[in-house]
Structures are given as C-alpha cells and as structure tokens.
Image (cartoon, grey):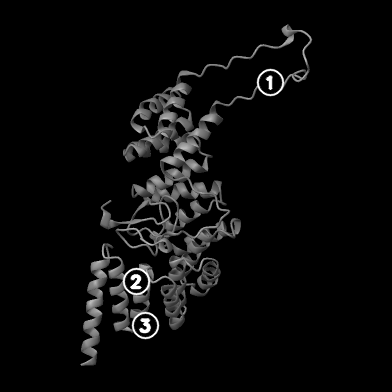
C-alpha cells in the first residue's frame, strides 16, 4: 500500500487501508485517524484500554515471546512421579539413583528449536530454512507450520505466509488463534469473504475474544452489514463488559446502524473514564449530532480542544460538525487549523481546498 492510501494505527503502528475502520493487527478503531500519517500528539495516539486487558500479540517481539512459550510447551514431556525417598538421607551412596539423561530431540524438533531461537533473535532469513525443514519433516504438525508462516510474513513474503497459515489452520481447526491470524492475513490480502469466514469460526471458538469480535465487525461494516456488526459486538460485550475498546466499537456500530441514542448511552461513560481521548470524544460528538443535539456536540468537541489545543483530529471533527450545522466560516477556520497542525496529512490539501470553498460561499452570501 502507498503511504497516502493507508492509515497508521496509533495503538500498534499497524498499516491499514484507508477504507478500514479498525486496525487489522490489533482491532483498534481508526475512525479518527487521518489517512497517510499517524497522529503526532500523545493524547491522539493513546489508545482507550482497560488496565486489566491483556496486551495483544504484536510484531516480532510478540512472535518471539509466543514462539519461546510454544517451544517450551512442545518439548515438555511429563516425567515419572517423584521417588518417595528423594528427600531422605541415603545410607549408602550406591542407593542414589543416577541422573536420567534427557532424550535427544528428533531432527525436526531440533530444526524447529534452532529456527525458533533465530527467529526470536530477529535473524529471520537464517530461521526460515530450519523452520521449513521442521514443517516439511512433520507435515501434520500445526505449530511448526504456523511458526513457519509467521517467519515468512516477517521476511516480506505474504503470499507464501498466507499459504502456510491456511495449512496450519487446516491442521488444527479448533485453534482459534490460528483462525484469527488467518483472518487478519486474508484481510490484508483483500479477501474479505474468506476473512469473514475465518473470523466467524474464530468467534465461534472463542466468543469472549474482543479483538476477534472487533475485526469481524469491521469486515461486516465494510460490506454495509451494520446490524451484523452490532450483533457480534454485543455478544462480545456481554463476555467483556468493561472492555473500553470493544464498547467504543459497539458505539460506533450502533451509530452507523442508525441507533444514535444507544450509541450515546454506550460512549458517554467511556469518555467519562477517558476524558483525554480525542477518538472517543469525536465519536460521541458525532452520535450526539446524529441524535439532534448539534450544539451540545459542538460544545463537547470545543471542550476537548480547550483541554488539548494540539489535537488535530478534534479540529477536523469540529469543522465537520460546524459545516453540517451551517456555520461555514467557523468550519473553514477549524479546517485550516487542522491543516496547520497536520500539514503532511493525506487529507490536508483536500480540507484546505474545502476551507477555501466555504470561505468563498460565505463571501458570496454576505455580498
């Protein structure tokens, strides 16, 4: 994707197509993120999270941690129960049992271990041949195939990585993590129908997983199926009622589905807990405006700007609300302030032209 055709997730740095509303990597909402560049202020970049929420698996570091745990699990074999006399003082040195030697790893297991260690160290090119050897030697081993797929993605070969991910998911069809990773890969590849099928299966296996629910809802929304998006997010919210990201996505979906009142009811408490979040403030203001509370929505955005004058996305939202309410001169001023704060944004030229058009309209009306 070209830089001017993507959105950079403020939470994890993931690259997303401009039309996507949630991050393909971590599920964070992109509704308030400009196309082409990432937000540059701390308040803009800070995600809405609960402290108790597990940190999602992201990037090479997450891969290294997950692979290390997987290697330990895969190579662990329970031994015999402890000897009842283990802690007794032996009467004769000959009674002490010799240390049992560790069983040697198979060729495939050794290749997997060495490849995983290299991958964890960031030596992807060296890891790939070893992981390929392990995956081919034990073709029914889903973990080997999945780890090989991750290495291929990290090496910049998404087509081969996708094929390996599909094989891993087929080998272990009850593994929700494999299904979710496959869904994300299919999203990145633009195969939305297949991605929906993968995420639907992952959601069936783990209905409590909020990130899977957000990704599935994003795909539904991209197809205009807002009611389906609301349904899947409601089910997930029943399992995780304190997940702010999930509730934010639900509020956005409700607003898109035409239920602005329910959206306001969901989003208001989130803003009370996270008053510094420009994203939540913008989404709540939009729902309030749709609800018919235009002046209150504008005031809500102005309050956010007063608290954080360097928040460009709030200026953009203020311009939109003012324009929709007929306050063209004020809308133009807000758009120009956004451009001043974010001159390199992909939509900066568009909004600068929009501001000029609104100013011209205002002059004609006054003459």
Residue 325 image label? 3
Residue that carries the numbered disc 1 in the rendered image: 80
Q: Is residue 352 left or right of residue 248?
A: left
Disc 2 from disc 3: Cα separation: 14 Å
Front of the two marks 2 and 1: 2
Residue 7 position in % (x across, y down): 34, 57
Q: Are the residues flagged by discs 3 and 1 in contact, CB closer than 8 Å?
A: no
Q: Are the residues flagged by discs 2 and 3 in contact, CB closer than 8 Å?
A: no
* Residue at screen point 37% across, 75% down: 318
Front of the two marks 2 and 3: 2
Residue that carries the numbered disc 2 in the rendered image: 316
Residue 94 position in % (x across, y down): 72, 6
Please rate how many residues cluster around mark 1, counting C-alpha atoms within 10 Å: few if below 14, some from 14 to 19, many from 20: few
Disc 3 from disc 1: Cα separation: 75 Å
Residue 253 position in % (x across, y down): 47, 65
- Quadrant of the frame with the C terminus: bottom left
Q: Secondary structure at mark 2?
A: helix
Please rate how many residues cluster around mark 2, counting C-alpha atoms within 10 Å: few if below 14, some from 14 to 19, many from 20: many
- Compared with 106, 364 (above or below) is below
Q: Is residue 361 left or right of residue 179?
A: left
The numbered mark, 3 or 1, whose residue comes first in the sequence reads 1
Q: Secondary structure at mark 3?
A: loop
Question: Which of 347 and 108 lies nearest the eye of the viewer?
Answer: 347
- Compared with 20, 276 (above or below) is below
């Amino acid at each position: 994707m070209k830089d001017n055709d993507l959105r950079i997730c403020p939470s994890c740095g993931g690259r997303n197509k401009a039309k996507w509303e949630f991050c393909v990597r971590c599920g964070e909402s992109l509704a308030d993120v400009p196309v082409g560049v990432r937000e540059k202020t701390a308040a803009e970049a800070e995600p809405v999270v609960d402290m108790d929420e597990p940190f999602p698996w992201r990037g090479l570091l997450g891969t290294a941690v997950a692979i290390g745990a997987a290697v330990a699990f895969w190579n662990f074999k329970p031994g015999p129960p402890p000897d009842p006399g283990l802690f007794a003082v032996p009467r004769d040195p000959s009674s002490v049992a010799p240390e049992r030697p560790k069983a040697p790893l198979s060729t495939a297991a050794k290749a997997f271990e060495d490849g995983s260690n290299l991958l964890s160290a960031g030596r992807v090119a060296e890891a790939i041949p070893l992981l390929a050897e392990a995956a081919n030697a034990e073709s029914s081993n889903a973990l080997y195939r999945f780890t090989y797929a991750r290495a291929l993605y990290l090496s910049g070969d998404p087509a081969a990585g996708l094929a390996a991910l599909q094989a891993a998911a087929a080998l272990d069809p009850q593994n929700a993590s494999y299904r979710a990773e496959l869904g994300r890969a299919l999203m990145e590849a633009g195969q939305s129908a297949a991605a929906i099928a993968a995420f639907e299966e992952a959601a069936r296996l783990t209905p409590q997983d909020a990130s899977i629910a957000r990704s599935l809802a994003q795909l539904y929304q991209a197809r205009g199926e807002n009611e389906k998006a609301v349904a899947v997010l409601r089910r997930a919210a029943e399992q995780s009622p304190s997940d702010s990201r999930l509730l934010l996505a639900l509020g956005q979906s409700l607003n898109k589905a035409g239920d602005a009142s329910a959206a306001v009811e969901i989003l208001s408490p989130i803003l009370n807990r996270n008053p510094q979040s420009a994203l939540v403030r913008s989404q709540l203001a939009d729902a309030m405006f749709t609800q018919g509370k235009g002046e209150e929505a504008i005031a809500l955005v102005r309050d956010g700007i007063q608290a954080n004058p360097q928040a460009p996305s709030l200026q953009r939202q203020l311009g939109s609300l003012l324009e929709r309410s007929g306050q063209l001169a004020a809308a133009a001023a807000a758009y120009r302030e956004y451009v001043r704060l974010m001159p390199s944004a992909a939509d900066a030229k568009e909004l600068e032209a929009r501001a000029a058009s609104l100013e011209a309209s205002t002059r004609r009306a006054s003459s």
